[in-house]
Image (spheres, rainbow, N blue to C red):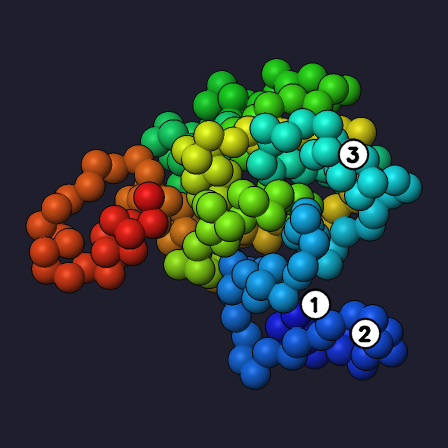
């Protein structure tokens, strides 16, 4: 477990359980960096990323493991996320397009909330009663196969916060693995969604910056002269396809 400079008694309480490995950051780090540190310490066949604002319902983790055991072509899977009132969160998503990015990450989103662009992105047409292959899942609860982590690599730490889960799923798909939504495993997610509620906020700008990185990385064609000039992004990209 990684404590990201929490300002409560979390580290003290965790230290009461000697079986838990705890690392306390000297400075605050991003979502990707913290999860990558934790995954590097882990030794299991399956690794679970679980947000602190979640509650695990009975047999949820067992159901995820059982699903992975029965489906060796699945590299990454995620639980069904529920709001505290029991309603389903739209956690399975389609990959972003230029249209969905405009509908969700610009001031026009207030007019496009009920648009087909937004509904398609959020997979409103999905059947939530059966496991299904999807493009990507919210990072609140993700289980990855160690073999996949070894071959595809960890989360991209160039995403400080947000969109790292989309990029990870994209790379997993590109490596020939499937990504699955497993509604038989349920997790309550106390989803605050700060970046969705306040456009002119630090979190919204972090989200926008991360989406711009994703667009450069996956939606735009490579620009060779940037690599010649030593642009760090394209050097990273060319060595991590």
Q: Is tag 1's residue or tag 2's residue first in the polypeptide sequence?
A: 1
Residue matched to label 1: 1
For image coordinates 87% across by 78% down, the residue present is 16
Q: Quadrant of the C terminus?
A: top left
* Residue 92: percent from left, percent from top: 61, 31
For image coordinates 46% across by 23% down, the residue present is 117
For image coordinates 52% across by 21% down, the residue present is 120
State if disc 2 and disc 3 touch (CB < 8 Å). no
| Secondary structure under the numbered disc 1 in the rendered image | loop
Q: Is residue 137 above or below residue 10?
A: above
Nearer to us of marks 3 and 2 is 3
Residue matched to label 2: 14
Left or right of 84 in this view: 39: left
Left or right of 150 in this view: 81: right
Instruction: Mark yes or no: residue 215 visible.
Output: yes
Residue matched to label 3: 66
| Secondary structure under the numbered disc 3 in the rendered image | helix
Q: Is residue 2 above or below residue 147?
A: below
Left or right of 18 in this view: 53: left
Q: Is tag 3's residue or tag 2's residue first in the polypeptide sequence?
A: 2
Q: Is tag 1's residue or tag 3's residue first in the polypeptide sequence?
A: 1
Give the distance between the C-alpha atoms of the residues marked 1 and 3, in whole angstroms. Answer: 24 Å
> In the image shown, does 210 or 118 lie closer to the viewer?
210
> In the image shown, does 151 or 103 lie closer to the viewer?
151
State if disc 2 and disc 1 touch (CB < 8 Å). yes
* Residue 132: percent from left, percent from top: 65, 22
The quarter of the picture where residue 214 lies is top left
| Secondary structure under the numbered disc 2 in the rendered image | helix
For image coordinates 51% across by 50% down, the residue present is 150
* Residue 38: percent from left, percent from top: 62, 64
Q: How many other residues sit within 10 Å of disc 2, few (<14), some (14-19) or many (≥20)? A: some
Give the distance between the C-alpha atoms of the residues marked 3 and 2, in whole angstroms. Answer: 28 Å
């Amino acid at each position: 477990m990684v404590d990201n400079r929490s300002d409560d008694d979390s580290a003290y309480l965790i230290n009461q359980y000697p079986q838990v490995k705890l690392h306390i950051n000297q400075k605050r780090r991003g979502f990707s960096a913290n999860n990558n540190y934790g995954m590097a310490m882990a030794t299991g066949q399956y690794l679970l990323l679980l947000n602190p604002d979640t509650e695990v319902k009975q047999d949820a983790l067992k159901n995820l493991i059982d699903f992975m055991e029965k489906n060796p072509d699945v590299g990454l899977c995620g639980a069904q996320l529920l709001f505290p009132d029991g309603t389903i969160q739209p956690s399975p998503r389609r990959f972003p397009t230029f249209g969905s990015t405009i509908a969700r990450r610009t001031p026009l989103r207030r007019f496009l909330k009920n648009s087909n662009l937004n509904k398609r992105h959020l997979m409103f047409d999905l059947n939530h009663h059966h496991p299904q292959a999807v493009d990507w899942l919210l990072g609140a609860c993700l289980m990855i196969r160690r073999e996949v982590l070894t071959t595809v690599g960890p989360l991209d730490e160039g995403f400080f916060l947000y969109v790292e889960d989309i990029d990870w799923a994209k790379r997993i798909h590109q490596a020939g693995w499937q990504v699955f939504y497993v509604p038989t495993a349920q997790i309550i997610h106390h989803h605050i969604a700060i970046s969705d509620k306040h456009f002119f906020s630090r979190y919204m700008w972090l989200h926008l910056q991360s989406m711009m990185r994703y667009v450069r990385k996956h939606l735009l064609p490579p620009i060779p002269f940037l690599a010649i000039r030593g642009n760090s992004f394209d050097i990273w990209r060319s060595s991590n396809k």
